[in-house]
Amino acid sequence: MFSSFRELAKCNPFFSPFQAQCEGRAPAKDGALVPTRNLGAAAASDEGDSCEFGSAKYYALCGFGGILSCGLTHTAIVPLDLVKCRIQVDPGKYKNLIHGLRLTFTEEGGRALAKGWAPTFIGYSLQGLGKFGFYEVFKVFYGGLLGEEYCYTYRTSLYLAASASAEFFADILLAPWEATKVRIQTMPGFANTLREGLPKIYNAEGINGLYKGLPPLWMRQIPYTMMKFACFERTVEALYKHVVPKPRADCNKAEQLVVTFVAGYIAGVFCAIVSHPADSVVSKLNNDKGSTAMQAAKDLGMKGKSFYLTLYKSSLQQVQEVWK
């Protein structure tokens, strides 16, 4: 299964963009799924593969790429995330991004803008491990259930199903750290560090306090991830078809990288649109002790002044994560 599905998987533009090719060529000698195409989109050539597709090392490398892409990028924009969460929880005090940054700096100093960096780094590193690692696992698993022909015909549906399944488990890894991060950032006097905040939540509310934000986290992240993969893939295809004046195989690395960045930014915008309502609920729910997801949504009215900040933050993260 791996040898045949390997050819299909390589046509996925979520891999490295540098060697993507879909031009016609002679029939494959090994009886590949689509012998009239070169589906080696982005992986290394067969002769130069660093590991076998579907092997334990392959999954480990994908997971490690997720750790780097998610953990580092989310940590790098903690100040934006801090202001976004404060706007969602207390929109009366924090009017917008610039006002929030200035007010935080004036009241708490420059170091306050980095509040929550530790749970952000750990939590989103674990989420990246699950998101990108499990995505490859589920893609191969579902591909085996569908069979070779349907894998190619319904490959977008395959990517959607695999990404949703991966994000389901990735958010279980993220939830405790997200709960701690939000409280550190939005509850003055609660805690200043991860070592102080995490035990305080557990001692006061038990394991439920760390995981009560999981359902809205699923509501935020699963559509986000499905949109990210599907929109990114279709945008890349559309750019090469309607915008780039030459086939992908004729583009150099710099040109392909530009296409990747543009597609990543566009996908990030759509990700923010579908995930913003649940994102607001997550921040409100983790901030209010004893609150439920329905109560948080009711209090917010499914509105918020942080939409454009969420949109910018999401699109920036998406551009950075395509480096996976």
Image: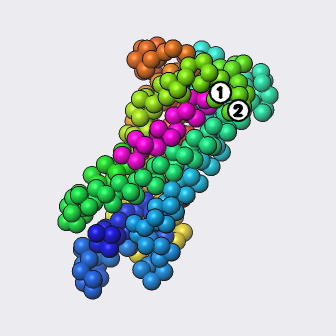
Tell me the number on the disc at residue 64.
Answer: none
Image position of 271 with respect to 260: above or below: above
Q: Label 2: few (<14), some or many (≥20) within 10 Å?
A: few
Tag 1: amino acid: Pro
* Most common SS among magenta residues: helix
Q: Which residue is mark 1?
A: 199
Tell me the number on the disc at residue 195.
Answer: 2
Q: Residue at x 56, y 43 (%)?
A: 124
Q: Quadrant of residue 309?
A: top right
Q: Is residue 178 magenta?
A: yes
- Look at the image and tell me in which quarter the N terminus lies: bottom left
Looking at the picture, how far across and down is residue 307, in whole percent?
Answer: 50, 30
Tag 2: amino acid: Arg
Residue 155 placement, left or right of 14: left
Looking at the picture, how far across and down is residue 248, in whole percent?
Answer: 40, 71
Element marked by disc 2: helix
Residue 217 placement, left or right of 139: right
Q: Is residue 266 magenta?
A: no
Q: How is the image coloured?
A: rainbow
What segment is highlighted magenta in the picture?
Answer: 165-182
Looking at the picture, how far across and down is residue 99, in whole percent?
Answer: 67, 25
Looking at the picture, how far across and down is residue 172, in whole percent?
Answer: 47, 38
Element marked by disc 1: helix
Between 1 and 23, the residue placed more toward the observer is 1
Q: Residue at x 71, y 35 (%)?
A: 114
Q: Are marks 2 and 1 in contact (CB under 8 Å)?
A: yes
